[in-house]
Amino acid sequence: MTHYQLYRSYLQARLGRLAERVVDDERGSATAEQIVMIGAAVIGAAIVGGIIWAKMQDGASNIQTPAP
Protein backbone atom coordinates (compact mmCIF):
# COMPACT_ATOMS: atom_id res chain seq x y z
CA MET A 1 0.00 0.00 0.00
CA THR A 2 1.48 3.33 -1.01
CA HIS A 3 1.37 6.47 1.08
CA TYR A 4 -1.18 7.97 -1.28
CA GLN A 5 -3.54 5.02 -0.83
CA LEU A 6 -3.04 5.11 2.93
CA TYR A 7 -3.82 8.84 3.14
CA ARG A 8 -6.78 8.44 0.84
CA SER A 9 -8.33 5.63 2.87
CA TYR A 10 -7.70 7.52 6.11
CA LEU A 11 -9.34 10.72 4.82
CA GLN A 12 -12.19 8.76 3.33
CA ALA A 13 -12.88 7.10 6.68
CA ARG A 14 -12.63 10.37 8.63
CA LEU A 15 -14.79 12.37 6.22
CA GLY A 16 -17.32 9.55 5.96
CA ARG A 17 -17.72 9.46 9.72
CA LEU A 18 -18.07 13.24 9.87
CA ALA A 19 -20.68 13.19 7.11
CA GLU A 20 -22.67 10.52 8.97
CA ARG A 21 -22.64 12.60 12.15
CA VAL A 22 -23.81 15.74 10.34
CA VAL A 23 -26.62 14.01 8.46
CA ASP A 24 -27.86 11.49 11.02
CA ASP A 25 -27.12 13.22 14.32
CA GLU A 26 -30.29 14.01 16.26
CA ARG A 27 -28.82 14.24 19.74
CA GLY A 28 -29.69 17.91 20.27
CA SER A 29 -32.98 18.08 18.39
CA ALA A 30 -35.20 17.70 21.47
CA THR A 31 -33.25 20.36 23.30
CA ALA A 32 -33.48 22.75 20.37
CA GLU A 33 -37.23 22.25 20.13
CA GLN A 34 -37.60 22.89 23.86
CA ILE A 35 -35.53 26.08 23.60
CA VAL A 36 -37.74 27.37 20.79
CA MET A 37 -40.94 26.58 22.71
CA ILE A 38 -39.64 28.17 25.92
CA GLY A 39 -38.53 31.24 23.97
CA ALA A 40 -41.98 31.59 22.41
CA ALA A 41 -43.60 31.27 25.84
CA VAL A 42 -41.29 33.92 27.32
CA ILE A 43 -42.00 36.32 24.46
CA GLY A 44 -45.76 35.73 24.82
CA ALA A 45 -45.57 36.33 28.57
CA ALA A 46 -43.62 39.55 28.02
CA ILE A 47 -46.25 40.79 25.56
CA VAL A 48 -49.11 39.98 27.95
CA GLY A 49 -47.20 41.61 30.82
CA GLY A 50 -46.67 44.75 28.73
CA ILE A 51 -50.36 44.96 27.90
CA ILE A 52 -51.35 44.53 31.56
CA TRP A 53 -48.78 47.12 32.64
CA ALA A 54 -50.10 49.63 30.09
CA LYS A 55 -53.69 49.06 31.25
CA MET A 56 -52.67 49.54 34.88
CA GLN A 57 -50.80 52.76 34.08
CA ASP A 58 -53.73 54.08 32.07
CA GLY A 59 -56.15 53.25 34.88
CA ALA A 60 -53.89 54.88 37.48
CA SER A 61 -53.62 58.01 35.37
CA ASN A 62 -57.41 58.36 35.20
CA ILE A 63 -57.97 58.36 38.98
CA GLN A 64 -59.57 61.66 40.02
CA THR A 65 -57.74 63.38 42.84
CA PRO A 66 -59.25 66.46 44.44
CA ALA A 67 -57.16 69.60 44.25
CA PRO A 68 -56.88 71.61 47.49
Image: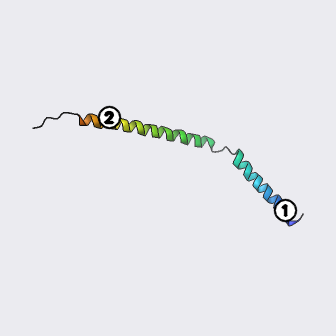
Which region is colored magenta?
63-67
Image location of residue 29, percent across then percent down: 63, 42
Identity of the residue drawn at 29% across and 38% down: 57
Identity of the residue drawn at 86% across and 62% down: 5
- Residue at the outermost right position: 1
Point out the image quarter for the N terminus.
bottom right
Asked if the stretch drawn in magenta spans residue 64, the answer is yes
Q: Is residue 32 above or below residue 55?
A: below
Residue 31 location, quadrant: top right
Instruction: Give me the disc on residue 31.
Output: none
> Which mark's residue is nearer the viewer, 2 or 1?
2
Of label 2 and label 1, which has the lower sequence position?
1
Image location of residue 27, percent across then percent down: 66, 44
- Residue at the outermost bottom position: 3
Image location of residue 46, percent across then percent down: 42, 40
Nearer to us in this view, 27 or 43: 43
Instruction: Give me the disc on residue 6.
Output: 1
Q: Is residue 23 above or below residue 3?
A: above
Left or right position of 27 against 67: right
